[in-house]
Image: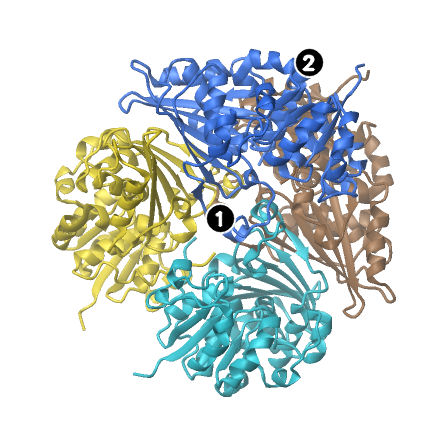
Chain colours: A brown, B yellow, C cyan, D blue
Amino acid sequence: MNTPIRVGIVGVSGYSGMELARIVAAHPALTLAWVVSDKWAGRALGDCLPVADPAAALTVRPQAESGEAFGSVDLVFLCTPAEVSLALAPKALDAGTRIVDLSGAFRLKAADYPRWYGFDHARPDLLAQAVYSIPEATGPDGAGSLRAARLVANPGCYPTASALAVFPLLRAGVIEPTGIIVDAKSGTTGAGRKATEEMSFSETDGDFRAYRVLRHQHTPEIERALALAGAPVGPVTFTAHLLPTRRGILATAYGRLRAGKTAADAAAAVQGFARGQAFVRAAKPDAVRLHAVVSTNRVLLGADADPERGIAIGFGAIDNLVKGAAGQAVQNANLMFGLDQTTGLLGLAGSTP
Amino acid sequence: MNTPIRVGIVGVSGYSGMELARIVAAHPALTLAWVVSDKWAGRALGDCLPVADPAAALTVRPQAESGEAFGSVDLVFLCTPAEVSLALAPKALDAGTRIVDLSGAFRLKAADYPRWYGFDHARPDLLAQAVYSIPEATGPDGAGSLRAARLVANPGCYPTASALAVFPLLRAGVIEPTGIIVDAKSGTTGAGRKATEEMSFSETDGDFRAYRVLRHQHTPEIERALALAGAPVGPVTFTAHLLPTRRGILATAYGRLRAGKTAADAAAAVQGFARGQAFVRAAKPDAVRLHAVVSTNRVLLGADADPERGIAIGFGAIDNLVKGAAGQAVQNANLMFGLDQTTGLLGLAGSTP
Amino acid sequence: MNTPIRVGIVGVSGYSGMELARIVAAHPALTLAWVVSDKWAGRALGDCLPVADPAAALTVRPQAESGEAFGSVDLVFLCTPAEVSLALAPKALDAGTRIVDLSGAFRLKAADYPRWYGFDHARPDLLAQAVYSIPEATGPDGAGSLRAARLVANPGCYPTASALAVFPLLRAGVIEPTGIIVDAKSGTTGAGRKATEEMSFSETDGDFRAYRVLRHQHTPEIERALALAGAPVGPVTFTAHLLPTRRGILATAYGRLRAGKTAADAAAAVQGFARGQAFVRAAKPDAVRLHAVVSTNRVLLGADADPERGIAIGFGAIDNLVKGAAGQAVQNANLMFGLDQTTGLLGLAGSTP
Amino acid sequence: MNTPIRVGIVGVSGYSGMELARIVAAHPALTLAWVVSDKWAGRALGDCLPVADPAAALTVRPQAESGEAFGSVDLVFLCTPAEVSLALAPKALDAGTRIVDLSGAFRLKAADYPRWYGFDHARPDLLAQAVYSIPEATGPDGAGSLRAARLVANPGCYPTASALAVFPLLRAGVIEPTGIIVDAKSGTTGAGRKATEEMSFSETDGDFRAYRVLRHQHTPEIERALALAGAPVGPVTFTAHLLPTRRGILATAYGRLRAGKTAADAAAAVQGFARGQAFVRAAKPDAVRLHAVVSTNRVLLGADADPERGIAIGFGAIDNLVKGAAGQAVQNANLMFGLDQTTGLLGLAGSTP
């Protein structure tokens, strides 16, 4: 039997951190050594969150102690805002600890930070070192470099759904690489765990709207993910919308159909891509729905095309907190440590309604 | 044609204030002279809220200006926390302005404030002067005193639904006045317009729970409402629950069936009570539902009984923001100024789904 | 005082019919003479639906009696499936009664019916006679012909939202007329009042998905609406999605930005279009939301553009049952009878949450 | 390693059957041998439902084949209407197969069926043989008889939540055994998987109401469960309400406080009961919420009391499809076959929002 891989989680009281603790607590090869959250500091994790033993017995530590704790684990998950991840990552690396960062701190090129994140990136050296990984897209090479990676930039929720909705169509030459539009819709947990009036139930239930139109920071990340996957594209138009539900993202992606391509080609592109992928399933477009992916690490994809309109449409559905955050983080951690990428993730079999 | 009655609203940016502005703006006999809210100060009301012209053109005033504005209106609606209402009411009365207060500031006896509201009431003289009015229950006498009232304590949402669910059964002698239990469920707007994590969509959607168990401040108000209606009762057990919907209250009330009384007596009590009441309808228990009352000033009542179990059950449904707040406030204002109590309220015909 | 215009409604028990009854019952110039529904036949309308008196006292008639009733009214609203409207319209016209048809029976050219509706249109003569009217877009000419129209094809919900999201950008020359994509999302009432497992709460709550991808019958209607509005376009790509909410449509429309055009041009196009329109408001893109239009006849529009991506985005929000069905039907009826188009519709002031 | 226990599921396409398939597919000691559903007959289970391999590869059989299949398994779960369970149970028993029946067919005494289920029970001999088991309440004896049981009557969802909310208070002598009232609220999946207009999203979202008032068939089952648990009670008043959410039941139970008992006694009763129970947790009343139990086999209990009002209130929350159906069925199956009762159930760690 192998030595368990010891992990820590910083930011366990946010939605991604909570979901991560739940998955890690039930993971056969990862052992949760400590968890950090100022909000829950001093309480037993099991009193804050429904996690399995023995993780439930851990006492949550304050963030001030995270630095000294880094040395005691093999891997730390940073479920923290980008600015905090930027401050903590060097400390963890100095302590010899590998990192999966769930923030946007290490996902883009340095030049993109001022426009999309509003700050100059202080550590371009770490950016150069960070491995961005959607295993199904950035693929074998990404996975190869994951084995050696010290710092993994875990993808954002929208970019995961969006890149995976588009990538099969690009890879199969069904659509042009320019003029791609992604119209995406997310549940409310994508906005994080916040106390704001606009995210209150009274304001959100029964509502639907777009937000951060043409300014969403996930726009360049979609472009980068596709480039890293070997399918470079022109500037992508991305629109985020807020759904009156808690979990799940549906990305509806539009691409210009290449001459001679058909609806059958679009469907075949998705089916071919899904084949052999543990977490990807192909479905008819109207079966690509949130219910089929919520609480799982699955990606459900579909596609159709209309030559008369010169358009192909790709659909991608994921759970924003699992495949879009914590699940993919564990999938990446599995690959970093030479485990099967599905370890601890197939049991998340989702739920009937 | 009569001179319009000029009214002001303090606290227009809360849910009750918004609903009140909407109703007053379309009211044939009330004219909205000014509205006050620090949050919206300086903006046109129509930019904050979908209200009809000319109210839409009003510029919202800061709260600091409410004092000087009192003299310019015949009636002010206070949609403010109890503490603020306590501070503003004397100023309005000094300015000769009549008041409908939507807070709990003037609903109870002085002796009840320390336990249920957590403060000593500084103005028992105003409490003595205040008229508490659920027109259907506190009835002709209440309405009579409303004509002369300077200060009306508008009932709370739960007490309105609860007292009306129970009152017909008491009035008709179907249940005993002791051992009454009200199990009530409310939509989220009942909690006001707040930025808290626990009221966020992510935390509330899909959830249901009780709150303030055995400590809710509406408990003594239910008892008082029934006493004022001529149906004094023993201590009432009241439990509030939070529904994952925005609007509406359903009160399920349990009373001890008096000897010889039957299910038919319970149903007849409600039908008899509803007869001739403009806003009250009797229905079968499973038709007493939120959809039938939301966005209206209606009260839907039903009742059943089981002699084997010695129990009668009364059901009452209202919209917490209309009959439970703004609509009843206008109903009371109508009675204060000698108008038909339904003026401006029947047009709120509710909505299909 | 004018003679009231007598109207009948066939199909009053569906969601559009219910909403129409509610609006007509409170309309100052229309009088509801009769209502038809097999489902509710023999019951008082007020027992089925919260409508104002005297409409509440009407006894609902079975559909078999609708033919003989046509002659007794000036106008009939057909809230029936396309096949039923096709059968009833000739009878109503023969009886000298004018028609507003809320189905798709008279909205397209005959040649479009086999592909999009699955039947050959039996009455191309009626199609030629029918006036299709979104008053804000098909505009003065449409309104002119409405004055004389015998048969008005009331637009579909998606086409209303979609055409209005796109039209200002086309009219102002901000976007090209080709390559337009509309990604639209609707509440569940858009699917009608149905007993199906897939539309059950358990299956729909928490879910989101597209449906009828590339085959939705509203696709050619959007193209036709824009052509009739004087802005002919190439084939439009249209995708419908089902939101987990009851009411409202948001259409997010993408068009190719014309050379030299900017975000300011896009915003100005919408503001210019909204000016002077009773039901249209311009807003920032993230304020174009369902809450602002639900239960009203309003259209909320917004737009933005990104020259780097060569794209403009138009947003349009409406209530699918009001501006997308019953409200627009009354707006068209107002214009048919020489009334102000807003008569009976401004009181639908919507609701706070 | 032990021989796996082979099981079959009849009625796999209903909500309880789906949940059961999901749990059994991941259970370490149960092997899913076959599944039956006319609706899904001929399809691969994995195409109908997100279940783990190898269950996903099973071909769903038509119900006509269930009889012949009984002999091939050690245990069959009947997720069928009571009438169907009554017909199938004898066949399974004849084939030597043990049964966990999730319907109401074997839960009551024969005399109770005409009034509460509307039929005369044809097999009182099977009723006499059936073991009714809520392991936490009917306890060691129940578990003992489970080891030998051929036919287990799995409790209903409401009775599980209701009996467990009340039982600790009875056991500890905090409340009287007469005059107990249970006001319960359930998500929509409790109504089963149905195509009815009243259960459609458009009719249910935003609504709340009681149903089957004083006639719900779970009423006598609550009384019987408590009697079997050693806490016989007088007739219980039970009211069911429909929540606008998919999963979860909250039972709010009222009992008459015995003289001298306090709020502390009520809380202690629940804490004492929860101690050492694998699936039961004690919490403060306002923390007994659906979010804490949905998708798990947990029971969350709380209690409070008010001597002034002579009342104690017990709260119980469960997932209606897990602890209220499929999870408890597996818990009972575990006990029937000598496994730890938690086997295959602790991994259902629930979910963050």
Judged left or right of residue B2, residue D122 is right
Residue A191 is at least partly visible in this image: yes
Q: Which chain contains the residue that carries disc 1?
A: A
Quadrant containing the N terminus of chain D is top right
Instruction: Confirm whether circles 2 and 1 share one chain.
Output: no
- The amino acid type found where label 2 is placed reads Gly
- Is disc 1 placed on a helix, strand or loop? loop
Judged left or right of residue B244, residue B67 is left
- Is disc 2 placed on a helix, strand or loop? loop
In the image shown, does C134 or A72 lie closer to the viewer?
Answer: C134
Residue that badge 2 annotates: D338
Residue that badge 1 annotates: A198
Judged left or right of residue D41, residue B219 is left
Quadrant containing the C terminus of chain D is top right
Measuring from the top left, give residue B6's x and y in whole percent: 22, 63
In terms of image quadrants, where is residue A246? top right
Q: Residues within 10 Å of mark 1 (few under 14, many from 20)?
A: some
Residue B11 is at least partly visible in this image: no
Q: Nearer the viewer, mark 2 or mark 1?
A: 2
In the image shown, does D34 or A72 lie closer to the viewer?
Answer: D34
Measuring from the top left, give residue D283's x and y in whole percent: 47, 23
Measuring from the top left, give residue D67's x and y in whole percent: 74, 32
Q: Residues within 10 Å of mark 2 (few under 14, many from 20)?
A: some
